[in-house]
Image (cartoon, rainbow, N blue to C red):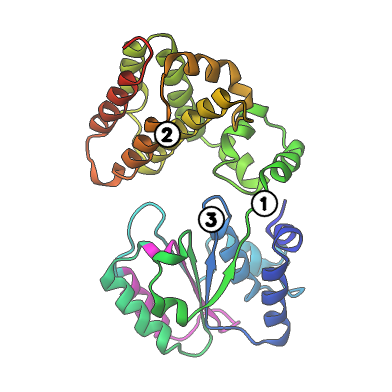
């Protein structure tokens, strides 16, 4: 599924609003894209930005012209991207942007564009510098900001931006759409909670990191369900070596989701990970009370950025898990 089709079929309000702005040449200088985790905020921001420089817009980007290809390849000179998804965006980045945009546009379109992904993760100093930039936009300068948490974006940024919201595709609809992807059902089920568009699910499933963190989750829980103490050792073996903070957070989130599925199993509700029903059944027999583990796991995942030693967080979680086993 292309981003164009995703917007046209599943985000009609955004599609019509931005399409009209392109057609009438009545663009805002700043757009704030808001969506829950899983929505393709960065990809949509890139596509909307690309639509401003496309050689053959309709009115959105054609994805075929030289300008579109250069944009995708990162070779479009008048475009800057700052990613706050894995680390905070600091003041120096904004100052770099201001300096670059104080010069004349290099490309023939004369349009200067920047995307700030997860704008809520900017430092206070960076935000103050950005506000000055937003208050006095020079010429054809356009900003696309994204956030997974609109409440955490300061009011002064929201008031200076046009807010465009992405709606989640319902889980049953998304699973149906994923039938066209050549992936095992268990991989689709594992990735649907984190990606709300089939193309991103397929991309992540084929990434180098996915098999590694999937194994860390499944093997640890399998071992724990058979022998909690050996599960403790398995967690240290597979989780501690993981290096990306993003991946470590995801592993802990998976633990919480599996504990939720244990609750769903116990009360006869549908599970998120139906392909892993045998594992969930074993966990239900091992864990006497999964509810405290759901809360604990989410709380532990929030600490990942503050801890250098992942092993301490693994210890904290596994100790709580062992305490909740039926053979304590």
Q: Residue furthest front?
A: 267
Q: Which residues are magenta?
A: 93-120
- Mark 3: secondary structure: loop
Sequence-wise, the earlier of marks 3 and 1 is 3
Sequence-wise, the earlier of marks 3 and 2 is 3
Instruction: Give the x, y percent position of residue 8.
Output: 75, 63
Q: Is residue 163 above or below residue 43?
A: below
Sequence-wise, the earlier of marks 2 and 1 is 1
User: Pointer 1: residues within 10 angstroms few (<14), some, or many (20+)?
Assistant: some
Q: Which residue is mark 3?
A: 36
Quarter holding the C terminus? top left
User: Pointer 2: residues within 10 angstroms few (<14), some, or many (20+)?
Assistant: many
Instruction: Give the x, y percent position of residue 303.
Output: 28, 43
Q: Which residue is mark 2?
A: 251
Quarter of image, res 206: top right
Task: Report whether 185 appears left or right of 248.
Answer: right
């Amino acid at each position: 599924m292309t981003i164009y089709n995703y917007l046209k079929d599943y985000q009609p309000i955004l599609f019509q609003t931005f399409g009209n702005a392109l057609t009438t040449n009545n663009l805002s200088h700043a757009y704030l894209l808001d969506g829950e985790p899983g929505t393709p905020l960065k990809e949509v921001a890139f596509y909307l930005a690309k639509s401003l420089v496309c050689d053959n817009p309709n009115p959105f980007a054609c994805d075929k012209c030289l300008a579109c290809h250069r944009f995708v390849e990162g070779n479009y000179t008048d475009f800057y991207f700052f990613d706050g998804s894995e680390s905070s965006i600091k003041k120096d980045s904004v100052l770099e942007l201001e300096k670059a945009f104080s010069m004349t546009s290099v490309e023939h379109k004369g349009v200067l564009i920047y995307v700030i992904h997860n704008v809520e993760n900017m430092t206070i100093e960076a935000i103050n510098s950005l506000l000055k930039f937003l208050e006095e936009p020079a010429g054809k300068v356009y900003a696309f900001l994204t956030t997974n948490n609109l409440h955490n974006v300061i009011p002064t940024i929201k008031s200076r931006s046009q807010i465009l919201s992405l709606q989640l595709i319902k889980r049953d609809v998304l699973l149906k759409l994923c039938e066209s992807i050549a992936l095992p059902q268990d991989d689709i089920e594992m990735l649907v909670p984190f990606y709300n568009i089939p193309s991103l699910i397929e991309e992540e499933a084929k990434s180098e990191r996915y098999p590694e963190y999937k194994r860390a989750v499944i093997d640890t829980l399998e071992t724990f369900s058979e022998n909690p103490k050996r599960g403790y050792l398995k967690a240290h073996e597979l989780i501690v070596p993981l290096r990306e903070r993003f991946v470590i957070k995801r592993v802990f989130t998976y633990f919480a989701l599996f504990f939720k599925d244990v609750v769903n199993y116990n009360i006869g509700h549908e599970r998120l990970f139906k392909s892993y029903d045998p594992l969930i059944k074993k966990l239900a027999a091992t864990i006497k009370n999964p509810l405290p583990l759901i809360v604990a796991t989410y709380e532990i995942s929030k600490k990942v950025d503050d801890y250098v030693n992942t092993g301490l967080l693994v210890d904290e979680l596994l100790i709580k898990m062992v305490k909740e086993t039926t053979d304590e």
